[in-house]
Image (spheres, helix red, strand yellow):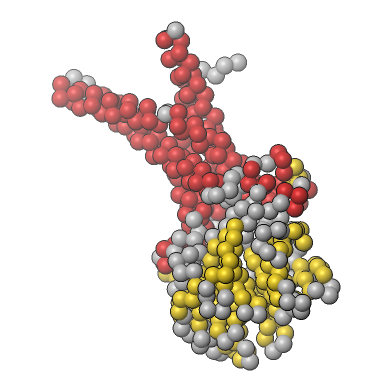
Amino acid sequence: MVMPQKSIRKFHKKAGLWAGLFLLVLSLTGFFLNHDQWRFQYDWTVSNTLLPESVAEADKKLFQAKTSRPGHANWLIVGGLRGAYISTDGGQQYQLTSRHQIYALRWFEERLLAATESGILQSFDYGQNWQPFALEGLWINALAVDHHKILASIEKTTLVVLNREGGIEHQQGVELPHDELIDEVNLSRLVRDLHYGRGLFDDGWSLLLNDVATWLLIFSILSGTWIWWGLRRLKQRKILLPSLTDANKNRSNKAANIKQMIRLHSYGLVLFSVPLLLLFAVTGVVLDHSEGLGKPLKSVTVKVEHLPPIYRSLREDIWSVDIEYDEEGVWHYRMGNRYGVYESDSLQDWQRVSEGFAYRMKRLGDTLYVSGMGAPSRMYHAETGWLNAKLPHMFRDIYTVNQQNVVFCGHSKKADHHTPKLPDSSFYSIMLTLHDGTFFASWWVWVNDYASLMLLVLLFTGVMRWFKKKHRIGSVRA
C-alpha cells in the first residue's frame, strides 16, 4: 500500500509543528556540548538564583583535578574547566587564582604544573600565581611527570616529551599496530561514541560531520517553520483581501519567496544529514535510558571490522598519559584510550598492556592508578603487575595527604567532596541540562524521547516526499 502524497505532507507538517522547538533545543545544545573545549562556555555564567538546582549540580562536575601542598594537609588546589582554586583551610573556603581550563595538576620538582586549554602553566607558590611554562596556545588534555621529564597530550592526537625547562625533546603522533587493537567493541561503547561525535572517522571528521548534520537540521527546522507560517499568512490574507490588486501583487511576491524557501528546504543536500540524524535520534533514546539498558548493551559486542574506520586506528583518542623512569634507566611511556593502556619505550612501537577504557592515569610514587570509564579501575606496580583496584568508577584524580591516598571524584559524597561552592553556573552546564532535560524535570527525558520519535517521522516522510518529487519530475521529463 502506497501512502498518498497528501498524507505524507500532513504527517511531515504535524511532526514538525509538534516537535520543532524541542528538536531546535536539542540540536543547538548538542552542538555546544560537542565543542566542550571552547573557553567562553565556562566564562559566561548565570547566577544560581535564576537557575534550577540541577544546573548547579551539573556545574560541580566540571572540576577535573585536585591535589594538596606537600606537608600542608589543609592547603588544597582544585582545578576545573572554570579555573584553578586554592584553599588554606581544608576546603572550607576557596579563592580563584586562574580562569584557565584545568585538565590535570602535577607536582614537578619545586613547582606545580597545570594542563590547560592554552598550554602548560606553572606555579612556584602552590597555586597562588600561574605563569606560562610550555606549549602555549595548545589544548593539553593530559599530563604526566617523572624524574626530570614531562609527557603531555596535545588535543588527544599528539604526544610531546618535555625537559625541565619546557623544551620539546620529542613529538610524536600515535600509530597503533593492528594486532594490538581489540577485536570487539560492546554496544554500550559504540552508542556513546556515535552520539558524542567520536565514532566514525579520525582527524576530526567525526565531529565535523556531526556539526554539518546538526546545522542542516537547524536549517530544516527554521525553514520549515517559516514556510508553514508564510503559507498560513497567505491563506489569511486571501480570505481578508480577495480582490485588491496591490494585495494580490504582494501575495504573489510572498508566494515566490515561499516557493524558493521550499526548494531550499527540500534540497538534496539535506539528505546528506539523514543517516547521521537517524543515529542521533536512536542513540539519544538509548542514552536517555542507559541505566536500564546498560547491562544488555554491554553484553552485545560488534566485530571491529564491521565498525567505522576510527575503530581500526584511534589516532585521536589519547585520554590519559603516564611516564616512568625505571631502576635500569629506561623510560616507559604509557597512553590510555578507549581500548586500554598502551606502553612504549620509544613512542613508536606500542603494546597494549591493560584492557578497558583508561579515562585517567595518575602516578603516586611507584604505583600507577588508572580510572576506568565503563571498565574497572586498576593499578600497576612493577612487582605486582596489573591489578583491579577498588576505586570509584571514573574518578578524576588521586593524591596523597598525610601519607594516605585520597580519591577525588569531582563532587561525589563517597570520596573527597570538598570543592569550591560557586554562586553561579556556566553556559556549558546550562546547555548540558537543557540537552538531557534535567533543566526542566527528571521526567523530561520522555519529552526528549518524543522529540526523537518525531525526528524519525520527519526524516521518513521528508525522504519519501523528496523521492516522490524526483520521480514526478523524472516522469514529466521522460
Q: Residue at x 47, y 54 (%)?
A: 32
Quarter of the figure that contains the N terminus: top right
Q: Residue at x 63, y 70 (%)?
A: 396
Residue 399 falls in image quadrant: bottom right
Q: Residue at x 59, y 57 (%)?
A: 173
Q: Residue furthest right?
A: 384
Q: Residue furthest bottom?
A: 71
Q: Is residue 265 left or right of residue 281?
A: left
Residue 191 placement (x, y as % from top left):
65, 47
Q: Is residue 447 left or right of residue 215?
A: right
Residue 359 placement (x, y as % from top left):
66, 63
Q: Residue at x 52, y 75 (%)?
A: 166
Residue 450 placement (x, y as % from top left):
56, 42
Quarter of the figure that contains the C terminus: top left
Q: Is residue 42 left or right of residue 313?
A: left
Q: Would residue 45 be visible to someone looking at this image?
A: no
Picture layout, residue 125 above or below residue 189: below
